[in-house]
Amino acid sequence: MLRQASTILTIRASRPGLHEFTDSARQFIEDSGIRDGLLALFCRHTSASLLIQENAAPAASRDLEAYFERIAPEGGPYEHEDEGPDDMPAHLRTALTHTQLSIPVRDGKLMLGTWQGIFLFEHRRNMPERQIVLHLIGE
Amino acid sequence: MLRQASTILTIRASRPGLHEFTDSARQFIEDSGIRDGLLALFCRHTSASLLIQENAAPAASRDLEAYFERIAPEGGPYEHEDEGPDDMPAHLRTALTHTQLSIPVRDGKLMLGTWQGIFLFEHRRNMPERQIVLHLIGE
Amino acid sequence: MLRQASTILTIRASRPGLHEFTDSARQFIEDSGIRDGLLALFCRHTSASLLIQENAAPAASRDLEAYFERIAPEGGPYEHEDEGPDDMPAHLRTALTHTQLSIPVRDGKLMLGTWQGIFLFEHRRNMPERQIVLHLIGE
């Protein structure tokens, strides 16, 4: 019979950019005892986001970070500047990436591909604590 | 025991851009009687999209709208022009944002962060009526 | 009572770009016997992605492909080049589009709009075989 489990993961990034937390998601699944189902991840912020990306090449992460700095730069023609120069770019980079992800689970394992990791994409420089809700439905 | 509830929300935007409908999602959850679960939202269109964004600063919404007008502009080198100059940019802006969102629900409440709202992002100028499917699984 | 069904769909694209596979998703739903629920699709790769887009106008697909070639071009200032010139653009185009999608199902039918199709967006030129996990929760 299907059931559900839920937790809130708290992450404080050490610097802006991509921070992998795949292992925390794996631990939550293991603790839940649910073996087959769907894991939903939800980032409770508008200036940080989620991304599934290459987990083996640090240069790929650096290129991704630099790319989003180029296409949604600080110092653009923004009206909303009162929370600092990195605030509006943070909203734009969040809109272009993901606030939520759902990943199937089978035999107790996330169905990620070999090179996929789950990342928090921190877009602010002051790096507040971030909350990610993990919600698992399955059996 | 888990169960599900579903409805179709109809929205006609008053102008192109971001239109918050968080309260309609909250009302659907309340009416469903489901207290804990996962709410899926699905936009049945390819020229309007969904976005979770800052719900307090109108200037942030205006900056977001202006940004997508800049990076996916009208008058680009598009082949598909027969449905009007705002049609192909609408498809591009939809591809860059979101057709679907899933948000956890706990104790009858959407697990949104303090500053997060759920928005329809209308990309067309003729603003047809839009359908968003809400689907809630939980108990 | 809610239950779930799951499969892995394998697709090898004939060329880079958008490849519709809506019919394969429909077949999976029919085979599952589940009539009402939520279908999750998950692409197990970081250089190919998922997109719901216009299913009737080939010119719209060509414009979409050309657009992503322009905003995440080959030959950019990338550090990660060892897997070929189309690798880093593939990661960027994946980040800008979608690794996962969830679509409600009602009366045995995907709740897509009239003009919506589900596409694999292949970003590499060597076009390896791609795996998409389909996971359906419902009854």
Image (cartoon, coloured by chain):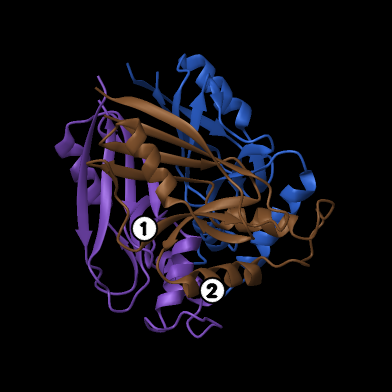
Chain colours: A purple, B brown, C blue
- Is B119 drawn above or below residue C121 in the view shown? below
Q: Which residue occupies the foreground of this view, A36 or A117?
A: A36
Residue drawn where x is 33% and y is 51% of the image: A42
Q: Is residue A111 visible?
A: no
In the image, residue B77 lies at what x, y percent? Answer: 79, 65
Dividing the picture into quarters, in which one does residue C26 lie?
top right
Residue drawn where x is 34% and y is 62% of the image: A45
Q: Nearer the viewer, mark 2 or mark 1?
A: 2
Whether marks 2 and 1 lie on the same chain: no
In the image, residue A12 lies at what x, y percent? Answer: 22, 67
The amino acid type, in three-letter code, at marker 2 is Asp
- Look at mark 1 in the image and give the residue it sits on: A56
In the rendered structure, the answer to whether residue C72 lies left or right of residue A28 reads right
The amino acid type, in three-letter code, at marker 1 is Ala
In the image, residue B104 lies at what x, y percent? Answer: 31, 44
Dividing the picture into quarters, in which one does residue C64 lie?
bottom right
- Look at mark 2 in the image and give the residue it sits on: B63
For the image, the number of numbered tags is 2
In the image, residue B41 lies at what x, y percent? Answer: 46, 42
- Is A39 drawn above or below residue C74 in the view shown? above
Query: Mark 2 falls within which chain?
Result: B
Taking the view exactly as shown, the residue that stands out farthest to the right is B82
Q: Which residue occupies the foreground of this view, B135 or C62?
A: B135
